Image (cartoon, rainbow, N blue to C red):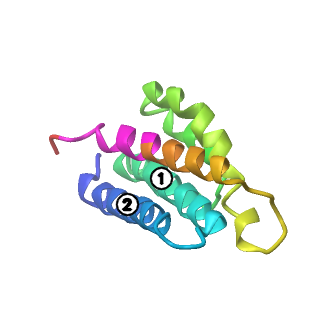
Amino acid sequence: MPNPEMANQWRSCAKTDYDVAVHDTTFCPIPIEIICYHSQQAAEKALKSVLVYHDEEVPRIHDLYRILELCLKHEPDLRKLSTQAKRLTKYAVLTRYPNEIDIEETDMRLALEDAEIIVNTISSLWQNQ
């Protein structure tokens, strides 16, 4: 049975992570790793909201492509998010520690775009609920 209330809470958390990532672009110097991390987190929570909506167990993993694969059972059209999910996954862990990943500002901008696409796509699934 669908659980729209709990899914909305997850999507709200996703939107907050995305908003934090966008806000952090105003800092000087720009915290590129933190923005990429929040972009990944926004996408992860948005994808997990699909599972919550469909009353599925939410896995404690950060691999967005694996999470997306679980979502496809309920929402096959989300396959179009595969590229974004694959690109964002690396920012879940590697951005938490110094010198683990070399990220440029162009990577950060792409991460923000990918997160926006995922968050907006999933938010539009149940707009009338």
**Earlier sequence position, callout 2 versus callout 1:** 2
- Point out residue 93 in the picture as x, y percentages from the top left corner: 72, 65
- How far across and how far down the image is residue 72, in percent? 51, 32
**Image position of 21 (left or right of 122):** right
Is residue 120 rendered to the left or right of residue 112?
left
Residue 56 place in picture, x, y as percent: 45, 50
Q: CA distance from mark 2 to mark 1?
A: 7 Å
- Judging depth in this view, the residue of 115 and 99 nearest the camera is 99
Q: Furthest residue to the right?
A: 99
- Residue denoted by label 1: 48
Q: Residues within 10 Å of mark 2 (few under 14, many from 20)?
A: many
Residue 34 location, quadrant: bottom right
Residue 66 seen? no
Q: Mark 2–mark 1 contact, CB under 8 Å?
A: yes
Q: Residues within 10 Å of mark 1 (few under 14, many from 20)?
A: many
Image coordinates of residue 17 in percent, x first then y, are 44, 64
Residue at 44% from the left image edge and 39% from the top image edge: 117
Instruction: Identify residue for label 2.
Output: 10
Asked if residue 21 is among those painted magenta in the image, a careful observer would answer no
Magenta stretch encompasses residue 121: yes
Q: Which residues are magenta?
A: 117-127
- Amino acid identity at mark 2: Trp
Q: Secondary structure at mark 1?
A: helix
Kindly report the secondary structure that dominates the magenta region of the rendered protein: helix
